[in-house]
Image (cartoon, rainbow, N blue to C red):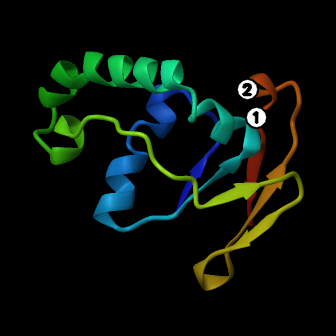
Amino acid sequence: MAFITHVHFDHCGAIPYLKKAFPASSRCVQKAKDILKRPNAIKLIQQLSAGVEDVLLEFDDAELVRDPFEPFEIDRVLQDGDVVELEDGLRVQVLATPRAHLGFPELLCA
């Protein structure tokens, strides 16, 4: 399962690959979902991701590095206070933190 805490390219750029490889479900807040639907945001994430490909290939020749960023579907929109139950009793709670990450939430794992 992939939790998108904010939409910097280095935080969401690998989500399409992860969804294909595992198939992982993706979760984020509405603000992130709205941004990821903007054509200019997709273009910028693609440009920034491609810009680091040569650097990453020096360390790893994995498909993840060569797989270009593509738009993807968000499987569930999270809101402040939501709790997601994972395996082995691990819980992830969404906490609104208006001053952090331009208003994106924090995740509390317990």
Check disc 2 and report the residue beneath it. 101
What is the number of the mark on residue 55?
A: none
Q: Residue at x 10, y 39 (%)?
A: 61
Q: Residue at x 33, y 25 (%)?
A: 49
Disc 1 from disc 2: Cα separation = 5 Å
Could you classify mark 1 by the number of other residues whose Cα lies within 10 Å: few (under 14), some (14-19), or many (20 or more)? many
Q: Quadrant of residue 105?
A: top right
Expressed as whole percent of the image width and height from the top left, the position of residue 81 reads 89, 58
Expressed as whole percent of the image width and height from the top left, the position of residue 60 reads 15, 38
Secondary element under disc 2, as helix, strand or loop, is: helix
Give 91 or 2, whichever is nearer the viewer.
2
Q: How many marks?
A: 2
Disc 1 residue type? Phe
Q: Residue at x 36, y 55 (%)?
A: 18
Secondary element under disc 1, as helix, strand or loop, is: loop
Looking at the image, residue 51 lies above or below residue 106 = above
Q: Residue at x 54, y 27 (%)?
A: 8
Q: Are marks 1 and 2 in contact (CB under 8 Å)?
A: yes
Q: Would residue 47 be found to the left or right of residue 35 on screen?
A: left
Q: Quadrant of residue 109?
A: bottom right
Q: Would residue 59 be found to the left or right of residue 89 on screen?
A: left
Expressed as whole percent of the image width and height from the top left, the position of residue 36 reads 56, 34
Disc 2 residue type? His
Looking at the image, residue 44 lies above or below residue 80 = above
Picture quarter with the C terminus? bottom right
- Looking at the image, the residue that sits furthest to the bottom is 88
Give 56 or 42, whichever is nearer the viewer.
42
Give 90 or 26, whichever is nearer the viewer.
26
Give 41 or 82, whichever is nearer the viewer.
41
Check disc 1 and report the residue beneath it. 104
